[in-house]
Image (cartoon, rainbow, N blue to C red):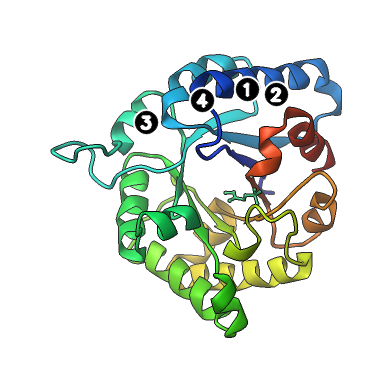
Amino acid sequence: MKNKILVANWKMNLSPDEEISLLKEVANLFKNNKKNIPDLEIIICPSFLALKQAKEVIKELPNFHLGAQNCFWEDKGAYTGEISPLYLKQIGIEFIILGHSERRTYLGEANEMINKKVRACLKNDLCPIICVGETFEEQQEGKRDYTIMHQTSTALEGLQVDESKRILIAYEPVWVIGRGKAVEPEQAEYANRVIQQTAIDCLPLDFVKQKMSFLYGGSIDEENVVSFKEQKTIDGFLVGGASLNPKEFFGIVLKM
Ligand code: 13P
């Protein structure tokens, strides 16, 4: 049985001080309500600037892990402004969000780059959280399945995996991110099945079944999370806006 997973992507919304205050508030909610908390893996992804301090805050919280919002594909060298997966690993980071649509859109991050980053994460025993999803235009033109299959297969191309590795894939339809209205849960379930089948075409079946998890992201909140969690292929959520409010985030936790 796979763990349920909840990922908080704080993007570039807060200053490092604000991020640490928010994390402390979330930590207090957990410490004070221990009995009611379902068994799940919580992955907090603040900005790079807050990662080291965040590590201290989550030390006493057993289900908490830290993720970065990106990394480079080389471990070290003359790559001005980039962040090394090796050094992220060394400061205790376990997960890396890769290929988020905001990076694809604003930074020109291409599928081939994402594949190199996925390889770099696996080499450094980091778990990639690969984001895939169609834009509004692609959805309108009936290209959703093609887009998510192509993004998934290029991200997973040529990977060497074994049972010590894990990979998470999040279906995030670009057109509902930050909109306050998610897609229908059945649509997310369908897309996750397409993604899972594509993963099976690329990687050994046992690895996909046991070591991969499939998430949904896009306007998840305390209200709608229940109808999504009933879907069979959705193992958890990648949450943006709602994760910035400690009570709302905790409300999602309680409903998982
Ligand atoms: P929202 O939850 O704000 O729609 O953001 C989703 C997202 O982009 C998480 O990575």
Separation of disc 4 and disc 1 at Cα? 12 Å
Separation of disc 2 and disc 1 at Cα? 5 Å
In the image as oriented, which residue stretches furthest toward the bottom? 141
Tell me if label 2 and label 3 are in contact, CB under 8 Å. Answer: no
Separation of disc 4 and disc 3 at Cα? 23 Å
Tell me if label 2 and label 4 are in contact, CB under 8 Å. Answer: no
Residue at horizontal 81%, vertical 15%?
32
What residue is shown with label 1? 23
* Quadrant of residue 194 within the rendered picture: bottom right
Considering the numbered disc 3 on the image, is that residue within a helix, a strand or a loop? Answer: helix
| Mark in front: 4 vs 1 | 4
User: Is tag 3's residue or tag 1's residue first in the polypeptide sequence?
Assistant: 1
What residue is shown with label 3? 89
| Neighbourhood count class around disc 4 (C-alpha, 10 Å): few under 14, some 14–19, many 20 upward | few
User: Is tag 4's residue or tag 1's residue first in the polypeptide sequence?
Assistant: 4
Hey, what amino acid is under mark 2?
Val
Considering the numbered disc 1 on the image, is that residue within a helix, a strand or a loop? Answer: helix
| Mark in front: 2 vs 3 | 2
What residue is shown with label 2? 26
* Image position of 228 (left or right of 49): right
Separation of disc 2 and disc 4 at Cα? 16 Å
What residue is shown with label 4? 15
Q: Is residue 106 above or below residue 18?
A: below
* Image position of 64 (left or right of 202): right
How many numbered marks, from 0 up?
Answer: 4
Q: Is residue 140 above or below residue 178?
A: below
Tell me if label 2 and label 1 are in contact, CB under 8 Å. Answer: yes
Residue at horizontal 75%, vertical 16%?
31
* Quadrant of residue 216 within the rendered picture: bottom right
Separation of disc 3 and disc 1 at Cα? 20 Å
